[in-house]
């Protein structure tokens, strides 16, 4: 219980200490990993006639592990949830100090919760914890072989590098604990009993994580300039800026962030008294959903302007849903130019 509290408490403390960030992925993803697995030597006991148990400490060699994950990354939050299947194999080096040629294999099914912290443009740190079940098979290398099911829990820390918009290279460390295990070997004249203490596994893997949802390429982001002034007058700075979004998205792309930065610079230079942000959506989806989506887009742009140094009290943000289309379309049409937010400087 003390180790369990340390693992889960340390994960929560790290999540609170680091600044919030967003995951590189949004939506569903899958991952494959492989690497090394280290089983801590176990203070086991052995008996042929319980309760007469004698020490039979089990020593393990370095083994290997393979894991598969499928999860969902919540948009603009940094949080992910995932299911994980793992297979680990370690040879048994000795039982009770006597060399042997046994093995311990385990299959785990875990539910994990993770949080991502963006360290650099392509580099992300992840921390999390999970709980689930383990099915293990123990072979002492002599005569006994049996299996057991146990509760398992783990702490997770990892790094991921974005190789492309949909593919990450990952490096993950897992500290896995399981409840006590027992294995029986029934023979003609007797039955052998192995009782192992709580299991402790440390797994280091490298792998790939793939985004199942392809983000649409954003349109070129450019401010919309007002009509040109008379020739004798000096050119005026743009008063309206357009920020475009991907389909069903409200996160800012790199190009969109540039447009927001340009709007913030113009607002400071002009001394704009008010900044009005209005979000819009295309006609794909219900009007109610598109209204909420347009409001999320407006609020994301407003938050980005505040981070750029614009006084939040000067900014109003709202959504128009699919009521003010830039390109007129029928219902249910995915139109990139209608997935936008406007920034007006007054």
Image (cartoon, rainbow, N blue to C red):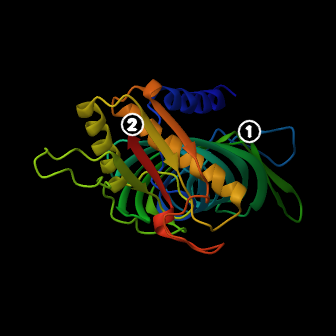
Quadrant position of residue 219 = bottom left
Q: Quadrant of residue 154?
A: top right
Which residue is at the front of the view, 139 or 10?
A: 10
Q: For the residue carrying disc 1, how many other residues have a C-alpha within 10 Å: few (<14), some (14-19), or many (20+)?
A: some
On the image, the x and y values in percent for residue 233 come to 14, 45
Pick the quarter of the image with the N terminus: top right
Q: Give the SS element for disc 1.
A: strand
Q: Which residue is mark 2?
A: 305
CA separation, marks 2 and 1? 69 Å
Which of the pair 242/129 is nearer the observer? 242
- Kindly state the secondary structure of the residue where label 2 is placed: helix
Crowding around mark 2 (Cα neighbors within 10 Å: few <14, some 14 to 19, many 20+) is: many
**Residue 74 coordinates in the image, percent (x, y):** 59, 50
Inspect this view and state whether residue 204 appears: yes
Image x and y of residue 169, in percent: 39, 60
Residue at x 70%, y 59% (from the top left corner): 287
- Residue drawn where x is 35% and y is 41% of the image: 119
Q: Return the x and y of residue 163 as percentages of the image width and height.
A: 34, 63
State whether residue 74 appears in this view.
Answer: no
Disc number placed over residue 54 in the picture, else none: 1
């Amino acid at each position: 219980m003390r180790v369990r509290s340390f693992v889960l408490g340390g994960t929560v403390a790290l999540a609170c200490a680091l600044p919030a960030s967003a995951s590189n992925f949004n939506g569903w993803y899958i991952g494959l990993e492989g690497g090394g697995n280290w089983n801590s030597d176990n203070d086991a006991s052995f008996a042929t006639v319980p309760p007469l148990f004698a020490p039979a400490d089990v020593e393990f060699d370095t083994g290997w592990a393979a894991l598969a994950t499928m999860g969902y990354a919540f948009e603009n939050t940094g949080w992910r949830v995932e299911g994980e299947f793992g297979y680990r194999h370690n040879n048994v080096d000795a039982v009770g100090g006597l060399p042997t040629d046994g093995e311990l294999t385990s299959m785990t099914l875990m539910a994990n919760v993770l949080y991502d912290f963006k360290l650099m443009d392509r580099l992300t740190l992840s921390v999390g914890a999970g709980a689930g079940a383990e099915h293990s098979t123990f072979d002492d290398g002599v005569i006994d072989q049996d299996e057991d099911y146990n509760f398992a829990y783990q702490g997770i820390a990892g790094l991921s590098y974005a190789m492309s918009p949909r593919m990450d290279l990952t490096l993950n460390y897992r500290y896995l604990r399981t409840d006590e295990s027992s294995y029986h070997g029934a023979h003609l004249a007797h039955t052998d009993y192995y009782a192992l203490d709580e299991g402790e596994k440390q797994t280091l893997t490298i792998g790939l994580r793939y985004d199942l949802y392809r983000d649409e390429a954003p349109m070129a982001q450019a401010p919309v300039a007002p009509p040109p002034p008379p020739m004798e007058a000096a050119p005026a700075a743009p008063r309206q800026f357009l920020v475009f979004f991907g389909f069903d998205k409200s996160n800012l792309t790199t190009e969109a962030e540039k447009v927001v930065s340009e709007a913030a610079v113009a607002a400071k230079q002009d001394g704009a008294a008010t900044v009005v942000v209005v979000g819009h959506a295309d006609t794909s989806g219900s009007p109610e959903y598109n209204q909420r989506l347009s409001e999320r887009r407006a609020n994301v742009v407003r938050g980005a302007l505040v981070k750029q140094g614009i006084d939040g009290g000067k900014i109003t943000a709202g959504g128009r849903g699919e009521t003010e289309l830039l390109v007129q379309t029928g219902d249910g049409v995915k139109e990139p130019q209608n997935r936008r937010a406007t920034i007006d400087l007054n």
